[in-house]
Amino acid sequence: MTQIQNYIQGEWVSGSGSELELHNAINGELIGSASSEGLDYASIMDHARKVGGPALRKMTFQERGRMLKALALHLTSIKEKFYILSAATGATRVDSWIDIEGGIGNLFANASLRKQFPDLPYYVDGVAAPLSKHGTFIGHHIMVPKQGVAIHINAFNFPIWGMLEKIAVNLMAGVPAVVKPSEFTSYLTELMVREIVASKILPEGSLQLITGLGRGILDHVTNQDVVTFTGSAFTGKKLKALPQIIEESVPFNLEADSLNAAILGEDAVPGTPEFDIFIKEVQREITVKTGQKCTAVRRIMIPEKLVEDVQIELGKRLAKTVIGDPAVDGVRMGALISKLQVERVRESVEQLAKSQDIVYGDLDKFEVTGADKSKGAFFSPILFRNNDPFNKTDVHEVEAFGPVSTIMPYKDLNEARAYQNGQRIIGHFHYHCR
Amino acid sequence: MTQIQNYIQGEWVSGSGSELELHNAINGELIGSASSEGLDYASIMDHARKVGGPALRKMTFQERGRMLKALALHLTSIKEKFYILSAATGATRVDSWIDIEGGIGNLFANASLRKQFPDLPYYVDGVAAPLSKHGTFIGHHIMVPKQGVAIHINAFNFPIWGMLEKIAVNLMAGVPAVVKPSEFTSYLTELMVREIVASKILPEGSLQLITGLGRGILDHVTNQDVVTFTGSAFTGKKLKALPQIIEESVPFNLEADSLNAAILGEDAVPGTPEFDIFIKEVQREITVKTGQKCTAVRRIMIPEKLVEDVQIELGKRLAKTVIGDPAVDGVRMGALISKLQVERVRESVEQLAKSQDIVYGDLDKFEVTGADKSKGAFFSPILFRNNDPFNKTDVHEVEAFGPVSTIMPYKDLNEARAYQNGQRIIGHFHYHCR
């Protein structure tokens, strides 16, 4: 069986055994198996600290920026490779574009930031602060790279963008990275890292990849390291509270569950361009990447008197969303990432259905074009309606991470804000990730 | 017995019983007793959220800034009151100046920042980001105050500065505060809050004060609140890992133990002005506030060939430091904050003395001027020498929070940096607090 490999200490290495098998989301075919069992994380961190870090720290901001730009240009020149494999994640061309070209765009954007920095390996912050008369004692901040490692733990929905948007930053700052993409889509990240390594554009040690479960990846962090986590709040909070994270005061950036809202203005009535834009945009937010975006609109807040109009128009547009194999002409929405995700999203929908009504879509009855519905990880768009969102509050707590959203009425803008302003019942918001 | 009181929900309230008694650091006289036992923190938070928050949020940045300036001017006009009580903490006039006028200076500095903000209650961040063609869909960040509470937990060494530097920020941002100074010096903070409340310059609910142990103060935090902690790393890390802090993703700013270093350059030999400045500055850093400053120089790194010179000159200057009641002419160093601190610092010195030698000062034999040595919390300056700081590493881990510092040699600047660069053996650095 094909092994998805780890790139550590300058070599491509298979983990022991198989931690999980990965399947094509459209046709269910086996892609390979992943494992990071048995990896020695102390040595991996050491490699980053002793090989990658010193090489990056010697470079100036200009050199690091040009390195990122060269990488972005190289990856753009071979981007079709990534589109081909990305299709296995259930993605349409547009879905893949967000992940692949959005990710490469991040490299370009960070590379451009070099213009705000000097041609030096460090950054002199502001002006000197006089601390005594006659200038005998002054203070001056000089910002230098941390001498540790950036460990990035990413979510399954952006196997490429998730890595590139994060490493662009640490590489610009002169710090090496260890990336752990979600094990569920690490085959796509693996392909990109193979191309990055083969290009020799980054100095050895500046990027290592863990494609399996990554158990133990945070065992050896110190206060010189940083950890970023994108994924479920449950796992993120567990990691953030690990003794070594607290003890060593390791900066820990947690991007987790979100329940983003779109609010229709009271004057954006049917017939206005704003109403049409709103319907189009919300439908797009529900279906793009089969709803697997942490910025997807999960709560649609509508002036009471317009709820019927929105429900009808949104239903019409969702009905036109052809589900199936994106390789087939006319298909607009692909599959979830895996059969496991189908089960998870179904559970969340069933939970939500206890307190609100499905007004569009069906968990079982829907058409799939160009693919075998039983083999792929397909899911129907589901539109809920919740007429009592102050009392039926699951909608503010439970995120179904698929093409699922809820319409709810509001009386006036204060009420809409009350849903949205982060009060206890609302859960957490964030707008950092796509 | 005089009760140090809490200011909560618009009233001055005594806690139940007495959690601890507070004594004058110079003569041991009883000042009063403190307690926050029995306070209802849910109601305290509610008062801040429902009374203080809305009042501050209505104000513009200009109004908030002018409020801070008015407060700073008022406190300056009555500053001698604070100097009188501050003497009870064992402080010299200079020590008190840092706390009192340093603190008020922070109010002025933050008030001036209003010039960078509009005359509005919110701040529009940057320019609009176009998200679609023809400007039909744009994004714009507007920064509004959090709708929660800033809880500030402070250290005993800066009862005034510790509060003012923190509330200046949250008040400018339109957020109310609950302040818990260290229970060991809360009598001084209480005096200042009495003056602040009586002045009616701040809207009611924007500042509440907990002068006792504050047990339960973090029980009701949500993601709208922020917590700042200054004090021991041990306590700080425990609070930072509380389930409600993790679960609600509450921003938690931890300023804890530090082991700051001063490095003498290799060319700053005896006879140069730099050498003299270094000796003077290090002596000052050891003795100001009887060494109870988290930025005090704890590690003095000296080129190998200059260690003897520094040891001799520093010893001479320390010998001139008259210890005693700062009210008496010629006294340059007062007392530690309490007898308890004498015990704690003594323990740390004894720990350090296992791996390095005391070259100046004695735990028991030292002169006290104008006060009864047995009644006050006096402590001699202690200078250690550690000739093997790579192997005798307690000096990089143990902070004696008094007039205690250690000379150590370095071979070249790389070695000095190795001590200082935050490697595992070095412990934590920070430069935020005074």
Image: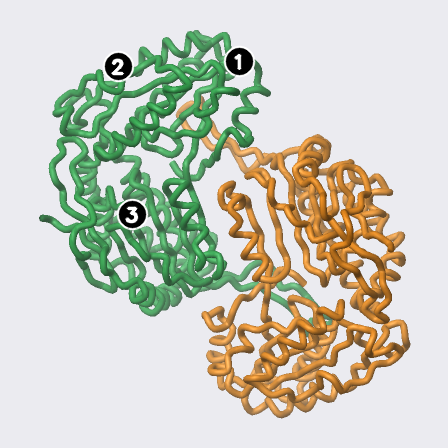
Chain colours: A green, B orange
Q: Nearer the viewer, mark 3 or mark 1?
A: 3
Q: Quadrant of residue B364?
A: bottom right
Q: Looking at numbered disc 3 in the image, what kind of residue is underneath it?
A: Pro
**Residue B104 visible in the shown view:** no
Which chain does tag 2 point to?
A: A
> How far apart, in angstroms, are the residues tagged by discs 1 and 2?
27 Å
Q: Are marks 3 and 1 in contact (CB under 8 Å)?
A: no
**Residue B203 visible in the shown view:** yes
Label 2, on which residue?
Answer: A320
Both marks 2 and 3 on one chain:
yes
Earlier in the chain: of badge 2 and badge 3, it is 3
Earlier in the chain: of badge 3 and badge 1, it is 3
Judged from the image, the secondary structure of the residue bearing numbered disc 3 is loop
How packed mark 2 is, by other alpha carbons closer than 10 Å (few <14, some 14-19, many 20 or more), is few
Residue A123, horizontal then vertical, whole percent? 50, 61
Q: Is residue B172 above or below residue B406?
A: above
Q: Which residue is painted at 26% across and 54% down in the image? A: A210
Q: Are marks 2 and 3 in contact (CB under 8 Å)?
A: no
Q: Which residue is painted at 42% across and 60% down in the image? A: A225
Label 1, on which residue?
Answer: A266
Residue B428, horizontal then vertical, whole percent? 53, 66
Q: Quadrant of residue B147?
A: top right
**B79 left or right of B66?**
right
**A336 left or right of A61?**
left
Q: Which residue is painted at 60% across and 88% down in the image? A: B357
Q: Nearer the viewer, mark 2 or mark 3?
A: 3
Q: Looking at numbered disc 1 in the image, what kind of residue is underneath it?
A: Glu
Label 3, on which residue?
Answer: A181
Q: Looking at numbered disc 2 in the image, what kind of residue is underneath it?
A: Lys
Which chain does tag 3 point to?
A: A
